[in-house]
Image: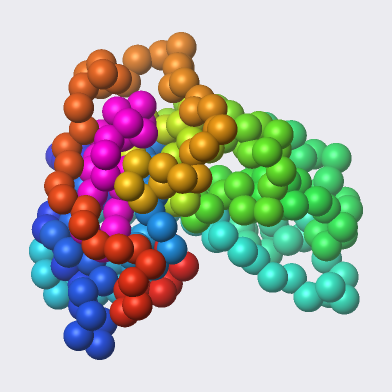
Amino acid sequence: MNSFLIKAENIGLQINQRQILDNISLTINPGEILTLIGPNGSGKTSLVRVLLGLLDAKQGSLQKKDQLVIGYMPQKFHIDAVLPMSVRRFLQMANQVPLEEIEATAGSLGISSLLEQPVQSVSGGEFQRVLLTRALLRKPDLLVLDEPAQGVDINGQQQLYQLISKIRDDYGCGVLMVSHDLHLVMEATDQVLCLNTHICCTGHPEAVSKHPEYLKLFGSSLDGMAVYTHNHDHSHDFAADSEAPNCSSCEKNPLQKGHDHDHG
């Protein structure tokens, strides 16, 4: 039996004769947080769609664990402002599970007090926790988080990423997280893959944050920013953080015209 959740090898994707993804290989394992970073238009969203089976890559191979259950947290979720719906009802509509299970999961994410509130009335950070609860009610093997801290202030972001680490520990699921900025998710991730159509570099977060190709893409955005230290109180059997990441040339200009404009 395969131990991985998803294994992609040499994935290539072209849309309208444009190369969106080129020779992408990655493995997502149970209990591991893999963060996919890259500038807008780098192919992040397209890669996630391929991994979820929503896009068919014509090149490479994709293997998944048998009967893989995925919980997905979207970057944005629009709810009509006049729709009368409580947080509890919102969670019930997405998951046909006992009410006790909804209450227990909501309690583990600290949103029990929100269950009777109109879903439109909760704050951005609270709604992100609601969406996390919604995804977890599927009891996923793999939790996919698309820009989970979107619209959340810096303090809320730190709390949210700490919560994601706790979810991984408590539920034992693998996590695929999509982000623009490594320095914000450093503390909450085990492995990083930096994407710009192809893989620029991949490895442990502290090593990637110092790699020339990462700095070429994100260096100016790091001025004056502290990078959090990745430090869990448990072991994942990884090599030391000082290990150099795997890397390849990343000469493409992420701002040039003709790039993939999928906002991720």
Q: Position of residue 246 (x, y in %)?
A: 17, 37
Q: Position of residue 252 (x, y in %)?
A: 24, 62
Question: In the figure, residue 47 lies in which quadrant?
Answer: bottom left
Residue at image position (50%, 55%) is 146
Counting every numbered tag in the picture gives: 0
In the rendered image, the vertical position of residue 166 relative to residue 262, given as above or below: above
Give the residues drawn in magenta, as a range.
193-214
Asked which colour scheme the image uses, the reply is rainbow
Q: Assess whether residue 206 is covered by the magenta stretch.
A: yes
Looking at the image, residue 222 sits to the left or right of residue 141; the answer is: right
In the rendered image, the vertical position of residue 55 relative to residue 222, given as above or below: below
Residue at image position (68%, 38%) is 154
Residue at image position (74%, 52%) is 124
Residue 106 visible to the viewer:
no
Residue at image position (81%, 59%) is 119
- Residue at the bottom extreme, as displayed: 16
Identify which residue, 119 or 97, lies in the foreground.
Answer: 119
Quarter of the figure that contains the N terminus: top left
